[in-house]
Image (cartoon, rainbow, N blue to C red):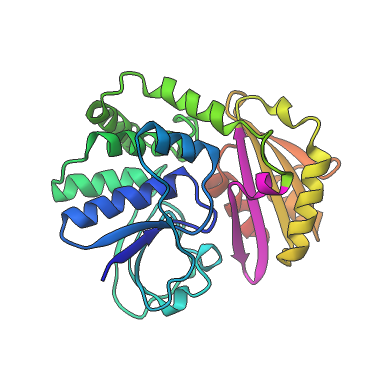
Amino acid sequence: MSTYIFGHTTPDSDSIVGAYSLSYLKNQLGEDSTPTRQGEINPETAFILEKFGFEKPMLKTDYAGESVYLIDFMESSQSPKDIDEATILGIVDHHKLGDLKTTTPLEMWVRPVGSSNTIVKQMFDYYNVEIPKELAGMMMCAILSDTVIFKSPTCTKEDTKAVKELAKIAGIDDPKALAMEMFIVKSDILNDTKRDLVFRDFKEFNMSGTKVGVGQLEVVDLTVFDTMKEELFEAMAEIKKEKNLHSILLMLTDIMQEGTQLLVLSDENSKIESAFEKTLTENQVWLPKVMSRKKQIIPFLEGQF
């Protein structure tokens, strides 16, 4: 019986590629596993998969009675609804400790690095398993995506080391040039509905019993949002109501300026303002040098809740 490996509900490149890389490693170690996904992939991930000749992993949302490995998350709010009925064999992640519980002991690889694929690379090294050329290229791209081409404060020397070694395996001379191609694709926001844009990289968090949703869009030029913020706010309001969120935030992150325009709809704006020590103007604020949701947004919000 195959073990399913998947990332969070709204998958990004790190979680999709991580499902592939971890599944390949497990199969090489004699553990039958299958990469899956909980949701639709974004344009950047589609670019990476096509670049290295991979198909989208199987879409699967029901896991009751199955054995699973989780990659790139360990929050119940980012899990399948029936996760309590699955057997979690292991977790590979680079986020904070979540609220999931297990009934049996499990394998855990959790490290404070910039990408889950950096950890998977270290797992390959630990087990002395060779990484195929095309898979190495995908893993390299996933790390560059999650670390925002090494600009994110979550980036570590271990991430840069992993990229260097994976690029050598993949035969890629200029990883940063490929990463810029990737981010230009990621910046294409004109072909999606505003609702889809909010959900493109969206995560829910349970903050002491309060539900908060935070999305992020990373682009190379923030001016692309100048004419659509009103529609983005409308989409955010719909989602806030549907999911019964106390607050919904959307990070519009400019990777060239290295900062984030934060859009906010909250039942208590004062909590958001206190979290970042900033005053909201028309429900938005510019946060210089803020690139990371997990390190520069979530911890400060949790402090308020």
Residue 141: give x, y in percent of width and height. Answer: 40, 34
Q: Is residue 80 above or below residue 12?
A: below
Name the chief secondary structure element in magenta. Answer: strand
Left or right: 88 as drawn, with respect to 212: left
153 or 15, nearer to the observer: 15
Residue 57: give x, y in percent of width and height. Answer: 40, 52
Q: Is residue 96 visible?
A: yes
Let me know if residue 188 is in the magenta part.
Answer: no
Left or right: 237 as drawn, with respect to 103: right
Left or right: 236 as drawn, with respect to 31: right
Residue at screen point 46% across, 29% down: 149
Q: Residue furthest right?
A: 282
Residues in magenta, as a range: 195-218
Q: Which quadrant would the C terminus be assigned to in this image?
A: bottom right
Left or right: 253 as drawn, with respect to 267: left
Let me know if residue 206 is in the magenta part.
Answer: yes
Residue 131: give x, y in percent of width and height. Answer: 21, 40
153 or 43, nearer to the observer: 43
Q: Is residue 165 above or below residue 296?
A: above
Q: How many labels were placed on the picture? A: 0
| Rendered image quadrant of residue 85 | bottom left
Residue at screen point 40% across, 44% down: 115
Residue 255: give x, y in percent of width and height. Answer: 58, 28
Q: Is residue 305 visible?
A: no
Q: Which quadrant would the N terminus be assigned to in this image?
A: bottom left
236 or 57, nearer to the observer: 57
303 or 133, nearer to the observer: 133
